[in-house]
Amino acid sequence: VATPRPTRQPESLDVAPPQPSAEKKEKIALHHLLVDDMTEEVDPKSMRGRVAFIQNTVMYVFINVCVVANTLVMFAELQVLGSISNASLGIGKHDNWSSAETILPVFEKMFSAIFLVDLVLHLYAFRLKYFKSTFNIVDTVIVVVTSVEAFLVTPLTSNTANIAIVRLLRLMRVTRALKAARVFKVCEGLRVLATVMVYSLGSTFWSLVILFIFQVIASIFMCHSLHFFVIDSSNDPSLRAWVNDMYGDGVKSFWTI
């Protein structure tokens, strides 16, 4: 009787997955450090969890669209200001933008209200952990300042002639330019790039110092080299005057270079 052959046990298929390299780990850590805003676990069945889910899905896309649209509205406001300036100088007429002066403030208040509601919902869902991200802190300051300007300062100063209050209104309106910074929240790549630029400020400063030193060296060289050309009366007077304007002394030479 033939003896049964021993069955060969199959090799274990539990192969450990390849571990990421140290460089890849650093990139993953950098990604989470720069991009992820909130890491708090919220119960998805609770009201906070539902609000957090809506904020990270539907509202995220909606707010990004509003940020881009608000930037376009602010640029249209610049065209209105340019039309007013041209009319004051007698260059053109302001009639073409008369209707825009009524419509654009409505859009401005609408976007301010949307951003304020978005901020309140974020604070409700994530509480103080929302401020772990630097971008969220900057975004909160922008939303609060622009909301105060749109809903408090502008209505209170619309019918006043007090110079101090009018100047305050002008100063508050300048902060509208900060709204364009909210575009960084739209694209992850912009946020990563901006954060990298912040971390590289030290290296950038010393790079500027090196460039400054080279510029001083070049200005000294050019000023000494062209000095005898300028004082030589046999050369063309107009050319001598031009060279003197460009490289006549240290300040001129440094500014030209």
Image (tube, rainbow, N blue to C red):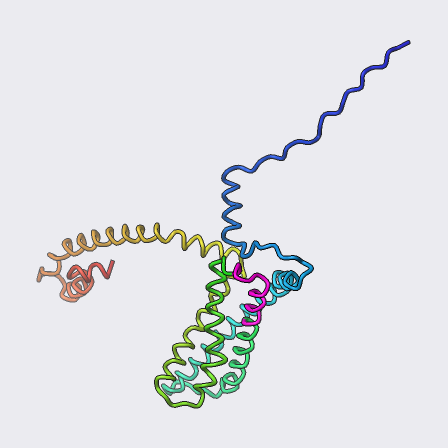
Is residue 129 magenta-colored?
yes
Name the image quarter holding residue 227: bottom left
At horizontal 43% and vertical 86% (from top left) the residue drawn is 157
Q: Position of residue 113 (x, y in %)?
A: 55, 75
At horizontal 18% and vertical 52% (from top left) the residue drawn is 221
- Can residue 64 be seen? no
At horizontal 62% and vertical 61% (from top left) the residue drawn is 52
Residue ranking furthest to the top: 1
| Left or right of residue 156, residue 48 in this image | right
In the image, the segment drawn in magenta is 116-130
Give the number of marks: 0
Is residue 230 magenta-colored?
no
Q: Position of residue 190 (x, y in %)?
A: 49, 57
| Left or right of residue 194, residue 58 in this image | right
At horizontal 39% and vertical 83% (from top left) the residue drawn is 85
Secondary structure mostly seen in the magenta stretch: helix
Q: Position of residue 234 (x, y in %)?
A: 9, 61
The front one of 33 and 248 is 33
38 vs 116: above or below: above
